[in-house]
Image: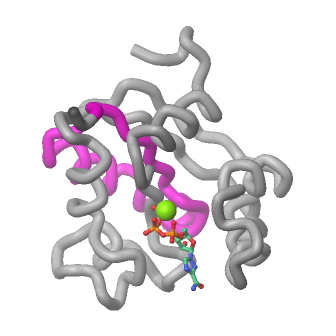
Amino acid sequence: MAGNLTLTMIKPTAFNKNYTGAILKMINEAGFTIKAMKLTQLTPQQAGTFYAVHKGKPFYDSLVSFMSSGPLVAVLLEKENAVEEFRNFIGATNPEKAEEGTIRKLYGTSLQQNAVHGSDSDENAKVEAEFFFSKLERF
Ligand code: RTP
Ligand code: MG
């Protein structure tokens, strides 16, 4: 059975452009409930750990540098079949290819600066939730 949690990050560019409120509104209106949330900045080492699955790929160093370049908002979300539902909801990785009306189409500015992250499996959602939040920070 599919899990009901997924982890998103409002990436530094979207945060810096003050898109956080609009993005969270869309997420809530799509039926996702916030279980934990924080504004934080990752060190390059922490961003490298978060994206360890991409280590060795051509975009890894640049992604790690971008994701540690400024504050981001980490949010743990709940909905039935959350991982798949959220990935369909935010649109394709490349904002240019994302469907009209999706968060990435509306608020993404490039393949890398695509506004938001979404966990790609239940297993990674759990790892990512534990990366950002202690038990005391989850509701
Ligand atoms: P995400 O993990 O951020 O939710 O996005 P995703 O699953 O759709 O994409 P993934 O393949 O996991 O890539 C993670 C992030 O790396 C950047 N990226 N750059 N060719 C490139 O330059 C490239 N490919 C991916 C994006 O920021 C992507 O969200
Ligand atoms: Mg991914």
For the C terminus, the quadrant is top left
Q: Which percent across, then down, holds residue 12?
A: 60, 62
At 20% from the left edge and 80% from the top edge, which residue is drawn? 99
Looking at this view, name the residue that lies furthest to the top.
136
For the N terminus, the quadrant is top left
The image quadrant of residue 60 is bottom right
Residue 78 among magenta residues: no
At 50% from the left edge and 83% from the top edge, which residue is drawn? 111
Tell me which segment is drawn in magenta. Answer: 3-32
Residue 9 among magenta residues: yes
Looking at this view, name the residue that lies furthest to the front.
1
Q: Which percent across, then down, holds residue 101?
A: 17, 73
Q: Which percent across, then down, holds residue 128?
A: 56, 39
At 24% from the left edge and 37% from the top edge, which residue is drawn? 2
Q: Is residue 94 left or right of residue 112?
A: left
Colour scheme in use = one colour
The image quadrant of residue 113 is bottom right
Looking at this view, name the residue that lies furthest to the bottom.
96
Q: Is residue 5 left or right of residue 79?
A: right
Q: Which percent across, then down, holds residue 9?
A: 50, 51
Q: Is residue 3 above or below residue 97?
A: above
Q: Is residue 138 left or right of residue 3?
A: right
Nearest to the observer: residue 81 or residue 21: 81
The image quadrant of residue 62 is bottom right
